Amino acid sequence: MSARQKRPKASRDRDLRILEASTHLFASQGFERTNMSQVARESGVAVGTIYLRYPNKGSLLAGVVQQLESQLADSLTRAAGQEIPWIDRFPLVFGSMMETVSTTPEMGAIMQLAAHAEFKGHSPGSIIRSAIEQIVTRAQSDGAFRPDVLPSVVAAIAYGMVEGAMGHMMQTGTWPQVYVIALADAASRWLLAT
Amino acid sequence: MSARQKRPKASRDRDLRILEASTHLFASQGFERTNMSQVARESGVAVGTIYLRYPNKGSLLAGVVQQLESQLADSLTRAAGQEIPWIDRFPLVFGSMMETVSTTPEMGAIMQLAAHAEFKGHSPGSIIRSAIEQIVTRAQSDGAFRPDVLPSVVAAIAYGMVEGAMGHMMQTGTWPQVYVIALADAASRWLLAT
Amino acid sequence: MSARQKRPKASRDRDLRILEASTHLFASQGFERTNMSQVARESGVAVGTIYLRYPNKGSLLAGVVQQLESQLADSLTRAAGQEIPWIDRFPLVFGSMMETVSTTPEMGAIMQLAAHAEFKGHSPGSIIRSAIEQIVTRAQSDGAFRPDVLPSVVAAIAYGMVEGAMGHMMQTGTWPQVYVIALADAASRWLLAT
Amino acid sequence: MSARQKRPKASRDRDLRILEASTHLFASQGFERTNMSQVARESGVAVGTIYLRYPNKGSLLAGVVQQLESQLADSLTRAAGQEIPWIDRFPLVFGSMMETVSTTPEMGAIMQLAAHAEFKGHSPGSIIRSAIEQIVTRAQSDGAFRPDVLPSVVAAIAYGMVEGAMGHMMQTGTWPQVYVIALADAASRWLLAT
DNA sequence: AATGAATGAGAGTTCATTCAT
DNA sequence: GATGAATGAACTCTCATTCAT
């Protein structure tokens, strides 16, 4: 048992360290200014080891982006799943996102870099947009949201709203709550069935 | 007089050709994959000539971004200045933006690259956000918009909405009008004074 | 006895598989483009196992070259040993060489790579040249060949003739028999005692 | 005049220095062990400058090979053009080749490396073979050579003879004259019309 | 004896920038 | 002002070799 697990564990540790270091470096320096030697140094592995997991620099970024997007999509879906009136759910949903972003400062920066990555089948932001789309669809079938809006278009615009708020927040340092209120306000008036 | 003007004219032509070529190349290939020789070749000038106007590659991108943002901000401000009820102005405002973007295909791509540029005093998107902010402020003082929303926050979120729509449109190829309707709908319900 | 032989047999199998795979890969891709992982994969052994037999990549190539040269030298010596008039022996000798080369397509390619190998005591081609030299010496002492030619020089030049023919044949795809006739013709006139 | 020639001259000097250094390095170390930094250092130019003339390492070797082959083909053609009986021309022809090779020690080594190069339309050795082929054809039409041998096949085999002699000479250090005599002897008996 | 994950030095190539013309 | 040949630091990626298991 210990023999069977020792290698995989060390291996997973390495993987995590590589991903962490990449996230940090890509976020703080951007894609091009980050080089593989830096990632190796910060991960505590050799350059070649990174190439054992990721065939090239672009796919390393893809890994980072996917991980962060999944994380954000999860917190989003969780917040949207609570059984309380939607008018009260909105602040929680947007709050969870803004909070995830403020507590994971890399997230905002990484989202911007997505264009570089080699995404195998999904483009940047698509994981999150798809999560939003599902939430909207369900809310419509529950009769909570207006039926005359297209979930995919709502998802695209709502994702943009959050990104816009995120960007401004990170630039100005404004208190997140301000955006949560504004976002929840906008979304309620826009989407709730009357 | 003619002597004084002849050169400046040729000079301005050169400037424009450099900016056009850069816009095209940055948009289609991204920042890093575009090199100064390409820009020189497409502009019909020598590499050194570009360096007479722009101290480095980053500031060339900054010039491109600034030009495009100003263009977008102009069309936005013009559309928002028409003296018709706001409920009818919204489709025009968003329509003008979406149209500018669809007819200037470089615009969407360039916006994404902004992170690389050396901006002297204003960060990417700020020209547009600032235009929106002015429009909102004026609409509030006219009594047309709810007074209880912060113009700067509205500007950030609204800018995001358009970006989100733009991105989705460019990815899926959906007809712009779909987004214009959705954006105008969302904005009216969110912002108009009741 | 069976216990003592079982392992050696498996071991010899492994050796052969490594040599076969190397021959194939070196011949088709060249020395530098062939890497040890490929050899390991095609041999069905681990990388480390190859290093148990061959201290480094160069000596692996040396092994391959030596094996092929010995094979060619054998067929040469066998053909030259037949008890028929030399005038009839020449076509057989050159025919056997050209045939060995055409039926072992790796041979030609491998000969070219020899420069890279770490040869312990004999340089590329020397096995074959030495076989030719012996044949010439014997033919001279039998009174069949002119006595006024230096066997070592004849060997060098004759080896080159075959190589030249081989190279041309592989490049142009000409029928081997054409070269066999030419080679036998040249050699008879050059070497036979009158 | 001086203004028009100054740059090209400096440029041609550079080209020559690059070619010289490459020839020397490829010959003494082989293709893979020679790296572009070494070539740059020995040429007295920057690495990038080499890439201004040759798009990659392979084409640099191609340039070297072509230059040397042309040189050898020239000396060959010149020697074969003298108006003396063929029986006396052979020693001169082979002598010129062996001499070119002994005085240009890189030549032998470079010939072996040819496989790596990117040849635009002609494969290694083909320049020389083609020169030999022309000589044979003319000698046949002059009635000096036997008409029943194929010039292209003779060229391939004769080229091999010289290569074999060259290789042996360089390995054993034997006096070139020994090979010249043997080669001329072999060629006369093989090719001359009786 | 056999394995194969890990290593890291070293390679070829690019390209922003300079400056003599 | 305009040019573009020259520069060389810096990058990503490869792969022979090792050694703990």
Image (cartoon, coloured by chain):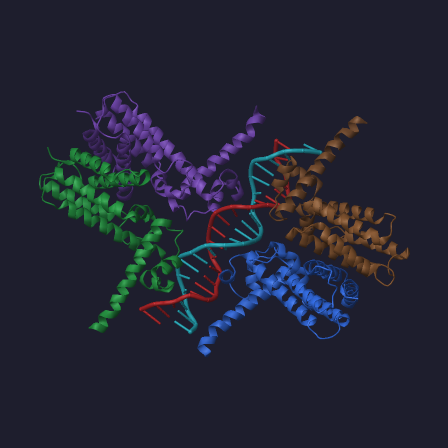
Chain colours: A purple, B green, C brown, D blue, E cyan, F red
Using residue D91 as the reference point, say whether residue A111 is left or right of it: left
Viewed as shown, does residue F16 lie left or right of C119?
Answer: left
Asked whether residue D169 is in view, the answer is yes
Answer above or below: position of A192 versus D157.
above
Identify the image quadrant of the N terminus of chain A.
top right
Is A59 above or below relative to C170? above
Q: Determine the residue positioned at 72% across, 67% down.
A: D98
Q: Residue A7 location, x and y as percent? A: 56, 31
Residue F17 falls in image quadrant: top right
Q: Is residue D30 visible?
A: no
Give the camera-side residue of A43 and F2: F2
Above or below: residue A8 compared with residue B132 = above
Q: Nearer the viewer, residue C58 or C30?
A: C30
Q: Please identify the residue farthest to the right as the structure is shown.
A: C142
> Could you say where residue B13 lies in the image, as x and y percent from the top left?
27, 63
Residue situated in front as seen by the camera: D30 or B149: D30
Q: Quadrant of the C terminus of chain A?
A: top left
Residue C105: x percent and y percent?
68, 45
Residue furthest bottom as drawn: D1
Left or right for D103, reference A150: right
